[in-house]
Amino acid sequence: MLTRIDHIGIACFDLDKTVEFYRATYGFEVFHTEVNEEQGVREAMLRVNGTDDGGASYLQLLEPIREDSTVAKWLAKNGEGVHHIAFGTADVDGEAEAVREKGVRVLYDEPRRGSMGSRITFLHPKDCHGVLTELVTSAPSRH
């Protein structure tokens, strides 16, 4: 079962300038930053609010660190903007299997490590009405 909007991923060319925009304009503060070498991004998670399931909702700002990363290729084609939406679930493996059984292509055979120690997988945008969709199980310490 999906429990919340975990985060909205926003691709950007300059992470520091984008963070400052969201801080100055909306008052959002950085909750977490990291470099994800596997995905080729530097990222900042800006906490928006808490959720009923004890988790939180975030904006995930993504700046590519390599030209061959998925985010760099997406930016080259589309420019800055919303890259994906992520839904939280207590069981990313079970949720991925359930949507796979409904004919939705799951992009990873096994979930991978995501932000803040989470476990993630993505669903093909062509099967989700043009929206790249991520499923996320938060790490226990994230709450």
Image (cartoon, grey):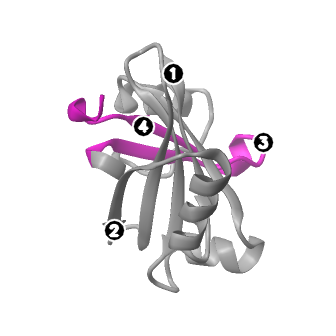
Q: Residue at x 61, y 27 (%)?
A: 102
Badge 2: few (under 14), some or many (20 or more) residues near its Cα, within 10 Å? some
Q: Nearer the viewer, residue 133 or 52?
A: 52
The tag earlier along the polypeptide, 3 or 2, is: 2
Q: Residue at x 41, y 15 (%)?
A: 53
Tag of residue 136: 4
Q: Residue furthest left?
A: 141
Residue 50, image x and y in percent? 46, 24
Mark 4 residue crowding within 10 angstroms, few (<14) / some (14–19) / many (20+): many
Mark 3 against mark 1, which lies toward the viewer? 1
Considering only order in the chain, which callout, 1 or 3, is on the residue closer to the N terminus? Answer: 1
Between 2 and 54, the one nearer to me in the picture: 54
Q: Which residue position holds label 1? A: 2
**The disc label shown at residue 35, or none:** 2
Segment colored magenta: 117-143
Farthest bottom residue? 67
Q: Quadrant of the C terminus?
A: top left
Of the residues tagged 2 and 4, which is closer to the observer? 2
Q: Secondary structure at mark 1?
A: strand
Amino acid type, residue under disc 4 in the picture: Val
Find the distance from the CA under tag 3 to the CA under tag 1: 18 Å
Question: Which percent across, then down, holds residue 6?
Answer: 50, 34
Q: Is residue 70 visible?
A: no
Residue 112 higher or lower than 100, as above or below? below
